[in-house]
Image (cartoon, rainbow, N blue to C red):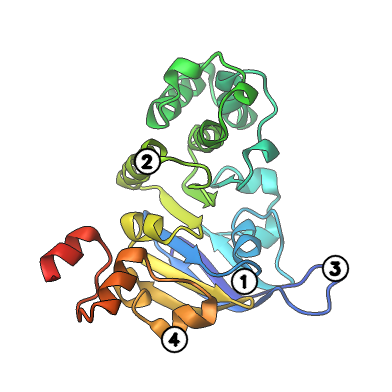
Amino acid sequence: MSFITVKNLNFKYPNGTENVLNDISFKVEKGEKVAIIGQNGAGKTTLVKMLNGLLKPTSGDVIVDEWNTQKYSVAKMSKKVGYVFQNPMDQIFHNNVYDEIAFGAKKLKFSEEKIKKLVEDAMKLTKLEKFSKENPYNLPYSMRKFVTIAAVIAMDVEVIVMDEPTAGQDFKGMKILHDLIDELQKRGKTIVTITHDMEFVVNNFERVIVMTNGKIIADGDKRDIFWELETLEKSMVKQPYISDLARELGMNEKVLSIEDFVENF
């Protein structure tokens, strides 16, 4: 069995008349990195909130490492799946960075020694070491995002879900994200992200799932996805800038990066 299995998933809010998600099925292997893309309202956030039980299916199943989310509480699922919200203010409520990052690990009742080791490692990955005693509310938005990412990393979960992690990030922040995602994958962690940043996708993920109107309309390698122009049009997703330029210049190769562009120009 795959590490994550989503099977015939449907969801609608209690007062809704139509499904937000319609017959969604896919699998993710342990250690895989997957980006989910699509326009606003496609169902991306609703879908990833199913992975840790924040939302429960109307019908169908979400199974993570043989745990069916229908049968477990969010607290229980948090041992396997960590969720980084789009807005860091939805997660932050301690008055210093160290305590904020340590909170989830404490809730999981790890030993003090293990908590210290996990928090220090998470701060190192997110470049927050020198801000450990700082109030998170005094940090810029981009760094607050890293506080919430570090808090999830410190919970030592197997699956890390990130909602729009690049929001507010500059070049330095993007480099930190790139390096920590690579390191987490090397450690065998499974990474799922939803984002509108296509350059971030092509630079960090091989597999891309495309959603529109609560359905998956494509699932495959990024080099195929970003050159399926009909799929991109249906999902209201644009090619990365360099790919669009290559297409306008009539280049036949599936260009996704500046390196690709130079090689095939």
Select label 2 or label 1 by which is in front.
2
- Tell me the residue that label 2 is attached to: 171
Q: Residues within 10 Å of mark 3 (few under 14, many from 20)?
A: few
Give how far apart the Cα atoms at labels 1 and 4 are: 16 Å
- What label sits on residue 230 in the rendered view? 4
Q: Amino acid at mark 1?
A: Ala
The image shows a total of numbered marks equal to 4
Q: Is residue 229 left or right of residue 260?
A: right
Amino acid bearing label 4: Glu
Q: Which residue is mark 1?
A: 42
* In the depicted structure, whether residue 231 falls above or below residue 189: below
Label 3 with label 2: CB-CB less than 8 Å: no
N-terminal of the two: label 2 or label 1? 1
* Contact between labelled residues 1 and 2, with CB atoms less than 8 Å apart: no
Classify mark 3: helix, strand or loop. loop
Q: Looking at the image, tell me whether mark 1 or mark 4 is earlier in sequence order.
A: 1
Residues at marks 4 and 3, CA–CA distance in whole angstroms? 34 Å
Q: Residues within 10 Å of mark 4 (few under 14, many from 20)?
A: few
